Amino acid sequence: MAKRVPPPEWAPYVRELGLALHRQRVAAGLSQEQLAAAAGITRATYAQLEKGLSRPDVAANPSLYTLVALSNVLHVEVTELIPRGAPDVSAWR
């Protein structure tokens, strides 16, 4: 099976997600390590999400489970983390 390549609009979209995570984390008074541990992910994984990356030069695509876990720890709705104006991914192959 061929690997799907996200559209170019995906990278700025997930960077916005990372900014939302950062803002909510700071507002909650949590370090990256505290938030990550409470959500059941590593600090390195969380740090990459704040940057909008899953690994160097690859845009993040966090699972719904991870987003819900983070929103639970931050005491916000998951919709407060997800940016508006999602890119069209219908051509994502």
Image (cartoon, rainbow, N blue to C red):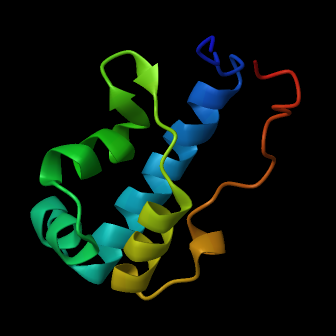
Q: Residue 66 vs residue 14: left or right? A: left
Q: In the rendered picture of this protein, how many numbered marks are placed on residues? A: 0
Q: Residue 87 vs residue 62: left or right? A: right
Percent position (x, y) of residue 17?
53, 50
Percent position (x, y) of residue 25?
31, 69
Percent position (x, y) of residue 36?
21, 64
Q: Quadrant of residue 40?
A: bottom left
On screen, 54 above or below 92? below
Residue that sits furthest to the front in the current view? 1
On screen, 29 above or below 36? below
Q: Residue 31 vs residue 72: left or right? A: left
Percent position (x, y) of residue 12?
60, 30
Give the residue at x 75% y 18%: 93
Quadrant (top left/top right/bottom left/bottom right) for the N terminus: top right
Front residue of this view, candidates 27 and 71: 71
Q: In which quarter of the image is residue 21?
A: bottom left
Give the residue at x 28% y 69%: 26
Give the residue at x 66% y 22%: 6
Give the residue at x 63% y 11%: 2
